[in-house]
Amino acid sequence: MTSIPPSSRSTGSGRHARPSGTGRAVAVLVLVALGALIPVLGPSPALHGTGEAEAPGTGGIALLRTVLFAALAVPLGELFVLRLARTLPGAPAVRPSSWARPAAAAGFLAALGLASVVATGNLVPGGVAEIDVGGLYESRDGKLALLEVNGFLAAGLCAGSRRPVGRLWPLAAVIVAEALRAHPTTEYSPLLGSGLTLVHLTCASLWVGGLLYALRTLRLWRTAEAGPALLGRFARVAAWLLAALTATGLCSTLRRMPVDTVVEQVTDTAYGRVLLAKALLMAAVGALALWARIRLGRAADPLAACTPARVEVVVLGLVVAVSGLLTAVPVPIRW
């Protein structure tokens, strides 16, 4: 990539280009934050006026799920972008430090907290004495909770492995366990629901964690031509990930809220309200991704696409938080 002469950087147009892009990014972020206001404030506003009772510890469970989802995204995204970077001709050998081990530790603690809730009959334990560890082996939810705990433990132990497959399998086990947990056997066609969640969670993890690691990599490749190429490759794959997320999300929504009840339930139930906020956030993410793709192809400096991409990472973080809350609020009744 050709460097910009100092004289061109000091022109009036150069001085005003960056504030303009940053200002628009901040404006988008503020609007998106307003759309996410209900879930960010917690479960109580989402449940207000719906007639649904808030389960004990809903806020804490939502927080633990958010940490668990983020802990999945970080290492999966690293593996994904590392694979993309290896196929780039002339890519620098330098790579950002891995966050896989800290993410696995956070995921382990979150999974352990969720397992303690399952061990007390889906109630928040008041003390260690109330936790029935042995009871986890006697129920489906308990076994899945233990699988998630062990999966993150194995992911932490394998984080330093040079073989990507060895780092991938523990994370895959956690995703499978989470997909099965989200759809109990008493649900209508649970295997279909688990399959949709499996694809949805995998694509979301690759996108969130991948974009984060790609931007960290670009900070080290500022003067390398491979930087824009890496971002371009990620953008092309992200388009397919967005399509898969949209399709699986829509199918999952229609499974829990039939077409003739969607409009009513999306405003009158906590699940519908949080889902609406998530949809608004995802629409903003799509707009930011498109903006970054346009700047990548048309701007004089392709790395100008990093500005909307950084905002996109922030909004994706909000999506992860909303998704954590979505798993904690009551599932709507299928009318």
Image: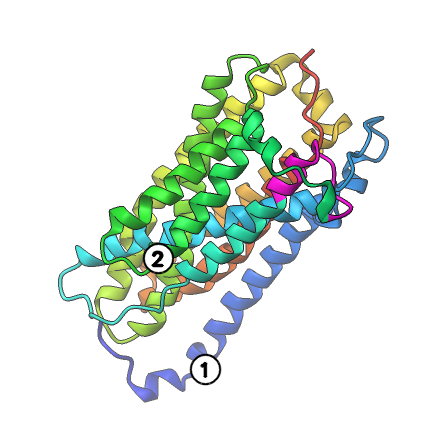
Q: Is residue 271 above or below residue 218?
A: above
Which sits in the foreground, 119 or 67? 119
| Residue displayed at 58% across by 37% down | 279
Determine which residue is flagged by label 2: 159
Helix, strand or loop for disc 1:
helix
* Residues shaded magenta: 114-127
Residue 59: image location, x then y, percent: 73, 45
Q: Quadrant of residue 2?
A: bottom left
Q: Is residue 210 visible?
A: no
> In what quadrant of the picture does the C terminus appear?
top right
Check disc 1: other Cα within 10 Å, few if <14, some if 14-19, many if 20+: few
| Residue displayed at 43% across by 31% down | 198
Residue 201: image location, x then y, percent: 46, 37
Of the two numbered discs 2 and 1 in the rendering, the one whose residue sits closer to the viewer: 2
| Residue displayed at 56% across by 61% down | 24
Check disc 2: other Cα within 10 Å, few if <14, some if 14-19, many if 20+: many
Determine which residue is flagged by label 1: 12
- Amino acid at circle 1: Gly
Helix, strand or loop for disc 2:
loop
Residue 76: image location, x then y, percent: 37, 49
Q: Is residue 205 above or below residue 18?
A: above
Residue 303: image location, x then y, percent: 34, 66
